[in-house]
Amino acid sequence: MHLAVLGINHKTAPVELREKVALDEEKCGSLSSHLLDNDGISEVVSLSTCNRTEVYVVASRPEIGRREAMAALAHITTVDLSDLEDCTYYHEGESAVGHLYRVAGSLDSLVVGEAQIMGQIKAAFHSAHERESTSVLLNRLFRHALEVGKRVRTETRIGENPVSVSSVAVEMARKVFDELEGRTALLLGAGKMGELTATHLAGHGVTSFIVINRTFARAEEMAEKFNGRAVHFEDLSDYLPMADIVISSTGAPHYVLRKGEVERAIRKRHNRPIFFIDIAVPRDIDPGVNDVYNAFLYDIDDLNDVAGTNAAQREKEARKAEDIIEAEVGNFIHWLSSLDVVPTITALREMAEQIKDGELQKAIARFDAELTEKDINRIEALASGIVNKMLHQPTIELKRAANERGGYLYVESMRRLFKLNGTKKKERLKSEHLED
Amino acid sequence: MSPEAITESELSSEKAAVITENTGSDKSFFGKSASDFVILLITAVTMLVLDIVLSISYYRSSSAPDLRWLLALVDIVTVLCIFGTFGGRVKHMLLSMKLALTLLFVILILAIVGTILPQGENVANSTWVSNPLYGFYNHIGLFDMYNSRWFLAILYLLGFNISFCIIDRLPTSFRRALKPRIEVKDIFIRKCPAAAAFEGAGEQGVAQAKDIIKSHHYHLRTAESGSVLAEKGRWSGLASIAFHLSFLLIGLGAILSTTLGFDQRLDIPDGKAAPVPNTELRVLNHGFNMETVPVKDGDRITGYRPSLYSSDLELTQNGDSLARKTITVNDPLRYSSSNWLLTLITSTKVNFHQSSYYQSPSGGYVSVLQVTYTPGKSLIYVGFGLMMIGICSIYFPHRRIWFKADENGELILGGRSNRSRVSFQGEFDRIEAELRLTLGKQEAG
Amino acid sequence: MDVSTIEQILIVATVITYLVSGSIYIWFLISRSDKAVRLATMLLYLALLTHTVALGLRWADSGHAPMANLYESLSLFGWGIVFFFLIAQRFYPVQAAGAVVVPTAFLVTSVGYVFYTGPEPLAPALQSYWLWVHVTIAMLSYGLFALSFGAGFFYIVQEYLLKKHYKNVMYTFVLLLSTLGLVLGLWAGSKLANPAKVMDPVTRLTSNVYAASDYIKIIGGGVVGLLIGMVLGYFAGKGGSKPGFAKRLPSLDVLDEVSYRGIAFGFPLLTIGIITGAIWADQAWGRWWGWDPKETWSLITWLFYGGYLHTRLTMGWRGRHSAILAVIGLIMVLITYLGVNLFLSGLHSYAAPGG
């Protein structure tokens, strides 16, 4: 009954390999059915995003987990086994739990604190759950992981301050305009970076886009994408007053927007602010624009600076998140160990012994001094005999179930029926040794 | 007080151009005819002489009544005449909002200075008395600033400014509120500060626009030609006139009260009578009464202070009793007599206010009354009312949107607001967006 | 224990709670902890409750609305500030403004407590129902202006940070707050040295009213203020370079709006306040306007806020310029309300502390 994870991510493998190993829904399905064919493997969840592919398995013995997962992955993705071996990481037991929690808390992500990973884990788990490749252990683990991810998100500020240039730009614009809903953005130049930022703005509710480019055809093309309006370069000063946000990314070697024009535009707008984002190098917008009343100019360096500060902030928050994860791993392991057979049996026996001893004492006390030493011994032997005989079959069954798929159910039921709570840590450690 | 009448003319742009030409013509006094100039010069010189003569006679006689208000009035008229004679555009100046704002700012600064410098009796207790220039300062009215000739002159100028603006704007404001122009030229709509156009939307577009604009709480009127005016806050312009009028009324009320009315202190010992100044009345103090409460420091009583004092007054004329009342600080005796000419118009009375009291050296209390007659009071109260109405109008600007389909089937909209243009622009943008959405949907469907 | 003792205990508790809550609001700006703001808000509600009870007790004990002397009206003013801030906080994300508004409430209420006097029957001049109307309306408008000030102040800070790209802002904060600290310190020192002597400011400066020990108090006050300002500036500036600091501040749009709304609602109230004052004065003294310092300053304040609305509504001002006006506006309000009482003599009965 061993939890293990095998995976590759952006840290261990180049993008070419990650692409090959990436699993779509169908491949995930065949991977898990392939793995579950093996008797030694009882549960499977596979998680695949653009930066990582991971297979979580529950195996009867540790070496089975690793070997089978690797083989299955190579089989499904038709990647050379030797290539895979060089680029994968493998964790088992406590360390595997910790790994999933770190992934869920987005500490293992390329951009620490990014928000998508939670959704991806949720989706991976749901599809695994639907194809019934999970059971007690992984169900519990993944649900717990999602909770941990949420805790990290709410209790630390890891995801709060954006670290990418375009999201910093959006963040800054929101400090001026609060809600971007219904605002107008003017794209000056139809560059890639400009487009990315515009996409971000659109995601935050910006509805009208005006695109201005030296080559009009390109402007039209871009305007199409954002359902906006292409405008000739000469008409810039007519359209500038309509813009709340200006994103500039032309390849021009000189300033495209100067202070005077901006001053006029803001006057025309009755002093409503304009937020300028200049992501072009060399810069498009005269830095003096930042001095214009109610104009705010951020160039690429400014945005990078903010992003850098934010990233440093995230590092700090990441340390807080590690503490949360450590504690949560402890909690999970505690639950997990309670599912172990040996401590369960020990607990069951202990309980039986306790009942037996209690009842014996009561019985002997009722006889007062009428009983001889010999009588007492005989009664004691009788009681022990009954207890042992009663517990014999369940003990054997439990031990057998432990190596079967879904054996946890027996353990759980046993614990619940007999109200066997809390295994002591010492026993847990002992049991781990015994199992190995 | 505002140049809106000119800048925000509803006329089409051609007409507006004519107006600017007209007003632009009298640039310097040489542009005027020679006879105009001579008449103006003579008026100015006359005013100046009158001003000087009045000033000299006022300052020479020590017992003359306080005529500073009259001097100030003559001053300001003189200044305006001289200004006009030498090429100043008096009418323009008096119509400008800039002047009003400048004057209000000057009043604000002077008011601050007036609270820092000791005023009236307070100056006797200050170090200013020992200042070598005290006499000079006192003479120019530094220690009685709010009643000084020049301060009053500024108030008069503000009054002129406001009156001119009201007269200038009144016809336009009435017309806008009562007989708004529904039918306008295309060019006027297109030149509005907030404008939009929808190609090919036509009459159907007008119908759509009606619905959408109506949902923004506009009141619609359609002309026979199909051109529509949507408006809200229709009374805003008149309310704004009311606001300006309130200044004038309060000012007039104040002038009336200081010129025709009076405000005098009257000390009457307990049980004595005294003639009421400026009238043939006598007032008899039947008894001064005072209630006190102990002032405690912990449980120790350190003294007493009055909690209530009153005088039982009887007003008589030629021995006939006219009125009797026990007055306290907030409960004066108000008496209106048929002898008073203005009573009916101003509904004002002689008032006897319980001002304070003191203990006379011979023992017994002397009641201090404030006897006032404020004929301008009702004007002032009407002014207060108008001011409140006017202030509320600030928040309900007059917003107007004209729209129609032009001969090419294009739906054109043009909007203006007399105030808060930013938020109007926002509303207009929303209307435009909604319209674009509806029209776009129809196109697609 | 008599009623006034209970009232005093409640007021002291209120003042302390305001201080704690205000400190947490400031801490919230730096630490960006949501827990902090929840705690601060909770404490503020608690303080408002004790404050309300204290005012109620005062009312019951003295038999008139708590508006008759400096202590009562300041206490009521502090109450109004907190009341309106809590309302604003419910509808707008203005928690950050608490870092200025709540300490202001603390300052106002505690200064009021300095002038504490036991409950007294109303002076004859104040025995009128106009007292209630006039003072309540004036206080409401002051509270709204205070709110507008808080939002305007943070507009200036947020705008500055945005313009500076959140770089090297610490020196500015240190400079700004230490100057403020110096001025407040000197003022507090001069209060200690020569408490509330009513005299016109020019006479005060030119005549030799201070003794040598007084100068030590004044300079000492200045130094302490300077140091406190520097420390606060250091922490605020240090927090300011973190992006999270600004994140706690609402956006310029919201701050501008709140600041404007405060004045938009406060101005008509101030107008009614002045008008009711004039009507009352006419009833009591037979003249509705007398250029008494209080009256004059209320006119100045009125003209000033009128100017704010004019620049905004007719001339299209918004943003920093309006925010600066909102900040100066509260200084005007404070002079009208406190400065006149403390520095200039006049008719308003609470002119002399404790009178």
Image (cartoon, coloured by chain):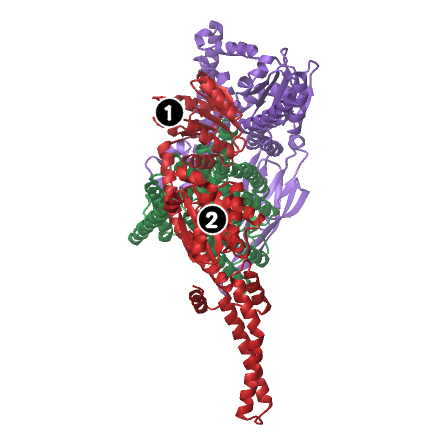
Instruction: Give the position of the C terminus of chain B as an image quadrant.
Output: top right
Q: Quadrant of residue C328?
A: top left
Check chain identity for marks 2 and 1: say if they share one: yes
Residue A284: numbered disc: 1
Does residue C23 appear in the picture of this structure? no
Q: Secondary structure at mark 2?
A: strand
Tell me what hue chain B is rendered in.
purple
Position of residue A164 measured from the top left corner of the image (x, y, whole percent): 41, 37
Q: Amino acid under label 2?
A: Val
Left or right: residue C191 versus residue A59 is left
Which of the pair B74/A242 is nearer the observer? A242
Instruction: Provide the residue designation for mark 2.
Output: A55
Q: Write down the chain letter for disc 1.
A: A
- Label the green chain with its letter: C
Q: CA separation, marks 2 and 1?
A: 48 Å
Position of residue B423 measured from the top left corner of the image (x, y, whole percent): 55, 29
Classify B109 as above or below C350: above
Does residue B207 appear in the picture of this structure? yes
Write the residue at 42% across / 37% down.
A168
Write the residue at 54% across / 20% down.
B193
- Label the red chain with its letter: A
Q: Nearer the viewer, mark 2 or mark 1?
A: 2
Q: Which residue appears farthest toward the top when viewing the image?
A: B34
